[in-house]
């Protein structure tokens, strides 16, 4: 009997972003079962710090993989489709607090490739942390905007969106304390900047009234994980959600986020 999988429509390309927390060490098999359940075609993993586990998941899934390693937190890309090229963006962007990966994934015949960027921006809810994330985004902007489309930008951006209300009362005590120190102000810089650049938040596009948060599994108070499409792909979006079923409450401190795109993309 095959493992159960999260339903998706026919001819859909499923994107998944998932912070697996400190490499997923000690949670390899529950995370594998969750990846099977999510049934992602292209999966961006942040905090994928253990290369042996990345290889383990890729091998068991039968997926292609690429990694961007860092001395802090690494990123991995798992794909049902061939990965034609991948680079570590931190090698050319010193302003990044953590690594980032850009890959070309062949999702169609010939040279039909989808460009996928997976980011993990600086953590923290303080105003200075959001300002630092804007420095990272600004440093990446020229690269992002100069590369071919269609494109996906996803990952743990550690930023809140003004249209997806946070729940400070549900947050960890230390997060509540930091918010109190800045008089409850939640800074909103990164997500509006991405919108200004024409990126579309898949979750907002598909489920604008869905209040589920991705951080944290124990204290769900914020949605800091995102899948953005460029304008060309927005009309291909079918559905998107923060997934809180199965093993997801126990595998990491983040819930995964998925989005389905109708194929073909072009």
Image: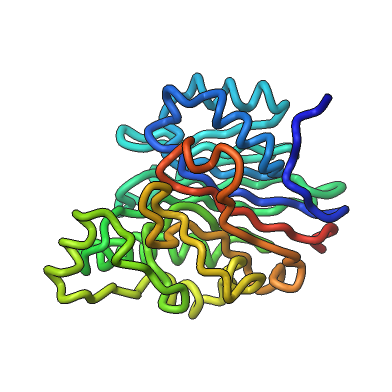
Dividing the picture into quarters, in which one does residue 138 lie? bottom left
The residue at the point 55 percent across, 31 percent down is 31
In this picture the colour scheme is rainbow
The residue at the point 69 percent across, 71 percent down is 234
Percent position (x, y) of residue 36?
68, 34
Decide: is 54 above or below 122.
above
**Residue sitting farthest toward the left:** 181
Decide: is 96 above or below 227.
above
Dividing the picture into quarters, in which one does residue 261 lie? bottom right
Dividing the picture into quarters, in which one does residue 183 lie? bottom left
The residue at the point 83 percent across, 58 percent down is 263
The residue at the point 79 percent across, 52 percent down is 8
Percent position (x, y) of residue 30?
55, 28
**Residue sitting farthest toward the front:** 169
Residue 87 in sight from this viewpoint: no
Residue 107 in sight from this viewpoint: yes
Q: Please indicate whether residue 196 sits to the left or right of residue 190 in the image.
A: right
State the residue in front, 107 or 14.
Answer: 14
State the residue in front, 211 or 39.
Answer: 211
Q: Quadrant of the C terminus?
A: bottom right
Q: Quadrant of the N terminus?
A: top right
State the residue in front, 79 or 114.
Answer: 79
Q: Please indicate whether residue 102 sits to the left or right of residue 139 in the image.
A: right
The mark total stands at 0
Percent position (x, y) of residue 82?
73, 37
Decide: is 55 above or below 213.
above
């Amino acid at each position: 009997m095959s493992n159960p999988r999260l339903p998706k429509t026919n001819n859909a390309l499923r994107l998944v972003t998932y912070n697996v927390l400190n490499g997923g060490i000690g949670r390899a098999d529950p995370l594998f079962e969750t990846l099977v359940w999510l049934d992602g075609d292209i999966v961006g993993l942040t905090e994928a710090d253990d290369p042996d586990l990345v290889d383990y998941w890729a091998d068991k899934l039968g997926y292609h993989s690429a990694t961007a390693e860092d001395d802090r937190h690494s990123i991995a890309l798992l794909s049902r489709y061939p990965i034609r090229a991948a680079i570590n963006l931190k090698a050319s962007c010193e302003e990044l607090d953590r690594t980032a990966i850009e890959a070309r994934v062949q999702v169609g015949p010939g040279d039909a490739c989808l460009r996928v960027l997976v980011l993990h921006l600086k953590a923290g809810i303080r105003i200075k942390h959001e300002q630092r994330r804007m420095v990272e985004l600004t440093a990446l902007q020229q690269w992002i905007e100069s590369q071919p489309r269609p494109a996906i930008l996803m990952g743990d951006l550690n930023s809140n969106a003004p249209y997806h209300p946070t729940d400070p009362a549900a947050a960890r005590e230390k997060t509540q304390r930091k918010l109190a120190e800045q008089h409850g102000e939640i800074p909103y810089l990164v997500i509006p900047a991405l919108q200004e650049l024409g990126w579309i938040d898949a979750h907002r596009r598909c489920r604008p009234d869905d209040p589920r948060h991705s951080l944290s599994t124990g204290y769900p108070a914020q949605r800091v994980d995102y899948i953005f499409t460029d304008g060309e792909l927005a009309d291909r979006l079918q559905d998107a959600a923060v997934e809180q079923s199965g093993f997801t409450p126990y595998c990491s401190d983040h819930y995964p986020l998925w989005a389905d795109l109708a194929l073909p993309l072009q």
